[in-house]
Amino acid sequence: MGASLALFVCVVGIAGLFYLDRDKSGRTSKGLWLPVIWICIVGSRPVSAWFGISQGSDAVQLVEGSPIDGAVFGVLLAAGIIVLISRRRPMSACLKASWPVIVYFAYCLLSIMWSDYPGVAFKRWIKAIGDLVIVLIVVTDAEPVAALKRLFSRVGFVLFPISVLLIRYYGDLGRGYDPDGRPMNTGVTTNKNTLGVITLVISLGALWSFLNLLRTKGQVNRAQHLLARGTLLAFGVALLALADSATSSACFALGTVLILATYLPLVRRRPGAVHALVAVILLAGGLAMLFGSQAGVVHALGRESNLTGRTEIWAAVLPVVSNPIVGAGFESFWLPPRLEKVWSNLSQYMHVNEAHNGYIEVYLNLGWIGVGLIAIILITGYRGAIAAFRRDPRFGGLMLAYVAAAAMYAITEAGFRPLLPIWIFLLLAVVGSHSIASGAGGGTGQARRARARGVTTPSASYANALGSAE
């Protein structure tokens, strides 16, 4: 098949997936397209890159950034804020229920005061707020579960088939080389790890959506929805294999285990069993590290015992930290003069601009205070997911999967940075879990009409959207 024919088939296939997955029973707002567009951008490559405008990787260009990308994110952020203004009450309730997130962003804003580049740090903080804005748009929708399912479908239906198309037929766009000169598949992104993480978060959602639909009887056009979401899941599994990102594959396996566990009668009757399952996973990983078998685990994943150079990066960046308590300031570590110092010590990884560890990355920029706040977010996110699980096991299972996947992903990748899919879905898990557990959220006009029909809490709305599993 030629490239032109493959492109035509891809476009027709994407249109077919959207057609098969159409559903008039769930009335989500038009504002949902803002999170879809935002995640499509952060999960692929910058808008400027799609137009062939390279930002570059030298120190000056990293400081200045791209005005085109800044303008795009600015427009989306402004539109998102307009949407949330009409949802002030549910938005306020959601934020109160997930206070650790607010404290973290407030501290990030405060840290700009000691940044060497306060102007740059402030602009990056504004973009970071956009991640929270799009999460709130989803959570405060009148039908949040329907919005969540459509978010997975719309993003996946676009990015997944195009990634396969670029890898197979447009190699100059869909393939590249890593710093060691080895070929890698990048799809719609510019790096295999970026392809892996967007595939990870959407595939977990596709799995959750497919399983829920599989257990729901009597839904209109159920066979068509199963075909569309099953195809999306198959694309996701295939792309994880093509991306060859060990971290994303391992996190997908972990998330899959947690999601499937929520369907076991023992776990659903005894939510405390979830604690035991998570404890077993953490204990197994801890013992592997304690007894020095981590090299065997890494080799089993097809990687080097030094985690493909990550240990050298960690050793190079930690001594450069000037203030271990508060760090260099929000998103300010990887700027001159520290940037040149790290690059000079890492000739093999000359243009590295992240620590490849989420916890170390936060430590570099925000110090121990930032690491502590991230720990609080993870802990409260876990507790919120468990609370949501007690009210709705299937939704709680998905939120638990995202919290656990984010915590694990950050071990070898900078998973807590703004404009990163895994960070966005961690925020969604924290805010969404606490919303359903505390009775917050639920949208505006449509939600009030739903409550008038007897749907008095978000959890009831979630359960209604998921459908009866019996």
Image (tube, helix red, strand yellow):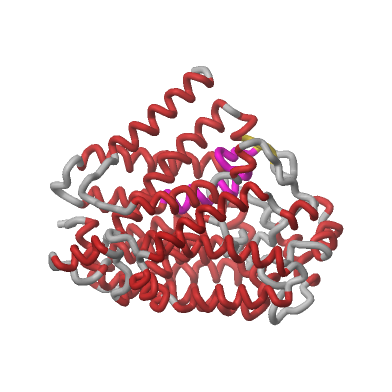
In the picture, residue 260 is in which quadrant? bottom left
Whether residue 385 is visible to the viewer of this picture, yes or no, is: no
Q: Could you tell whether 432 is left or right of 27 in the image? A: right
Q: Could you tell whether 304 is left or right of 234 in the image? A: right
In the picture, residue 344 is in which quadrant? bottom right
In the picture, residue 256 is in which quadrant? bottom left
Query: Residue 58: x and y, percent?
Result: 79, 51
Residue at image position (55%, 70%) is 287
Q: Which residues are magenta?
A: 184-203
Work out whether 51 lies above or below 106: above
Q: Is residue 185 magenta?
A: yes
Residue at image position (44%, 49%) is 36
Query: Residue 25: x and y, percent?
Result: 20, 49
Q: Could you tell whether 214 is left or right of 275 in the image? A: left
Q: The C terminus appears in which quarter of the rendering?
A: bottom left
Toward the viewer: 19 or 177?
19
Work out whether 335 lies above or below 47: below
Q: Is residue 11 magenta?
A: no
Whether residue 334 is visible to the viewer of this picture, yes or no, is: yes
